Image (cartoon, grey):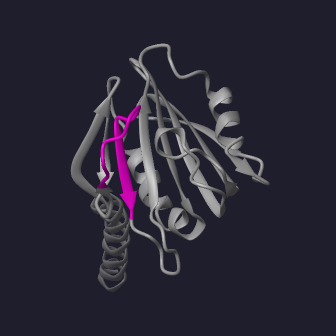
Amino acid sequence: MKRLTLPLLLVSLLLIGCSKKEEHAVQSALSKDKGSVAGIEWSVPGRWTIGAQRQMRVATYVAPPAEGDSESAECAVSFFGPGQGGNIDLNIDRWFGQFEGGTVPEKTSREVNGVKVTTVKISGTYTSPGVMMQSMGKKPGYKLYGAIVEAPEGTVFFKMTGPGKSVEAAEAEFDAMIGSLSK
């Protein structure tokens, strides 16, 4: 009986260690840097840098470009005040309108630590205005990952855009950041 117990114990410990390693990998993807607005807080992905302050943004984060992409992905965090910024579907429609030939938005909803979150993915040719509403030109092969967060003090928008491979490479980090939301 002892011969069977020891291997089962070792396998159990190994399985526990694997799940803890996966949890640690997600947590280590996040840095100690925090962002906060509207009664929520989040952790910033460790590979991301804090971008220049921009008008109408709480924060701007930059994810490094993926191999083969010449541009980084950028994640803008916006909060316009209580009751401001429009409803969820209006914002998803607006984001979709920033793409020519865009894919139908993939929309999901969930709750993260007591906060309602709607996420969306869109890809196509990005035509959104850049800084000060001036056009950046058409950007084919771009993707958008967005999260609309119903925070205690109003709606907060997380919008990551960039070349497809760069946005895809930052997807797990974006998801970890949204998963770190807390009140």
Q: What residue is drawn where x is 56% and y is 50%?
A: 145
**Left or right, residue 96 beside residue 58:** right
The answer to whether residue 180 is magenta is no
The answer to whether residue 59 is magenta is yes
23, above or below 105, in the image: below
**Left or right, residue 67 beside residue 11:** right
Q: Over which residues does the magenta segment extend?
A: 50-63
Quarter of the N terminus within the rendering: bottom left
Q: What residue is drawn where x is 24% and y is 43%?
A: 34
160, above or below 63, in the image: above
Quarter of the C terminus within the rendering: top left
**Left or right, residue 107 beside residue 180:** right
Q: How many marks overall?
A: 0
> Which residue extends farthest bottom?
3
Q: What residue is drawn where x is 52% and y is 47%?
A: 130
* Position of residue 110 measured from the top left corner of the image (x, y, whole percent): 56, 37
Q: Nearer the viewer, residue 32 or 111?
A: 32
* Position of residue 168 measured from the top left corner of the image (x, y, whole percent): 55, 65
> Which residue extends farthest left?
32
Asked where in the image residue 142 lies, by quadrant, the reply is bottom right
* Position of residue 81 measured from the top left corner of the image (x, y, whole percent): 41, 18
* Position of residue 141 measured from the top left corner of the image (x, y, whole percent): 66, 65
87, above or below 98, in the image: above
Q: What residue is drawn where x is 33% and y is 77%?
A: 5
Q: Nearer the viewer, residue 175 or 95?
A: 95
> Which residue extends farthest top?
83
